[in-house]
Structure formats: C-alpha cells, structure tokens
Amino acid sequence: MISQLIINNEKTITIDFLYLDLNTCDRCQETETNLDEAVSIFSEVSKCLNYKVLVNKINVNTKELAEIHRFESSPTIRVNGQDILGAIKENSCPACSAISGQETACRVFEYDGKAFTEPPTAMILEGILSVLFNKNVDKGTVQFVLPQNLEKFYLTTEKKTEGCSCNGSGCC
C-alpha cells in the first residue's frame, strides 16, 4: 500500500534545453553531451526522491520560437522554467556566426572561477538540484524582449535560407 501511495505522488521535474544549432555549433553540441551526462547521473537521485524527469530539447531556429520560449541566449538550460546557468554573458561564436553570415555571440559560463563555452556537467547538476530544493523561486512576470543579437541572427539566417531547397535545415 505504501509503494502505491508513492507512485501516485510522483512529481515531475522538467528540463528544457534550448539551442540554436546542434549540427554545427560545438557549444550547443557539448552542452547537449554534458546535459545528457548530468541527467544520467541525476536519474538515480530522482528515483529516490520520486521525481519523473522530462527533458525537452528545443531547436529555437526562428524568431517566433525565441519569443514563445523567451530565449535570451544559446545554449540555455531551464529546470521547471528557471534558467540554471547563471547570468548571461556572451562572446563571439564562430559556428553560429557562420550559420547566420554575421557576427553572433553565444553564451559563456562561469563556474568555479573559470569561464567555459559550454556548462560543465557539475554546473548543470548543481543547477538542477538548486531548483529542485528551492521551493520559493520567484519566476516574476518581466516582459520579454528578444535580444538584439538574436534578432539579427534570425533575420540574417532567414534571408540566407529563402528559396533554399533545404528549407533552412542547414545546407545553405
């Protein structure tokens, strides 16, 4: 009877991975790898705490999707809607610049006194646990404004793929 009660009280933790490109961008690719590793490590803890983990990988490849997801920088990891990777700092991303044909900046992550172009697995794990155990997170209702950097990225990417047979999937 107790095990039935625990199953009925299963909670969900939702992890959203938002990114610009997994085909070319090494930052996005490495972030995905580190996220997968963090989720794998976290899976045993989540079972003990009776959490079901849902991971959504979202290619934010249009301005409309960026606005829907309130996407501020690539890559982003959110747990239950909260960005777990700290303040947004960016520097030039050669891969995303090549995709859009113009200078594009992507995220840089500060962890343990060092800067990384992709968040380390430990940083992701700490972020997940921080959100999980902080029950009083204020998500606020701040109006979203698409950052100028992404506005330009989507505009130039859209122009670059107009009339392209690949329909924007990266061949152009």
Image: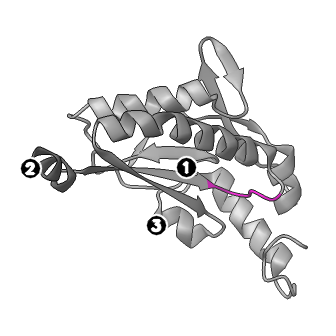
Count of numbered circles in the view: 3
Q: Who's the residue at 78% across and 68% down the image?
A: 157
Q: Does 17 sit left or right of 22 as displayed?
A: left
To which residue does mark 1 refer?
A: 72
Q: Amino acid at mark 3?
A: Ile
Question: Residue 111's mark?
Answer: none
The structure residue drawn at horizontal position 85% and vertical position 88%, both measured from the top left corner, is: 163
Q: Residue at x 77, y 49 (%)?
A: 104
Place of residue 6 in the rendered image (x, y in percent of width and height, measured from the top left): 17, 47
Task: Tell me where residue 139 appears, x and y as whole percent.
Answer: 29, 44
Q: Nearer the viewer, residue 32 or 75?
A: 32
Q: Secondary structure at mark 2?
A: loop
Query: Is residue 22 rendered magenta in the image?
Result: yes
Residue 16 position (above or below residue 172): above
Residue underneath mark 2: 1
Q: Amino acid at mark 1?
A: Glu
The vertical placement of 145 against 115, above or below, is: below
Could you give the CA–CA distance between mark 1 and mark 3, rounded to whole angstroms? 11 Å
**Picture quarter containing residue 40?**
top right
Q: Nearer the viewer, residue 5 or 89?
A: 5
- Measured in 3D between alpha carbons, the distance from the residue under mark 2 to the one under mark 1, in whole angstroms, is 46 Å
Up the image or down, 113 lies above or below 172; here it is above
Cα distance between the residues tagged 2 and 3: 43 Å
In the rendered image, which residue does mark 3 sit on?
68
Instruction: Count residues near mark 1 (Cα–Cα under 10 Å), then give few for <14, some for 14-19, many for 20+.
Output: many
Location of the C terminus by quadrant is bottom right
Magenta stretch bounds: 19-23
Residue 132 is left or right of residue 32, and the answer is left
Q: Quadrant for residue 120, please give it.
A: top right
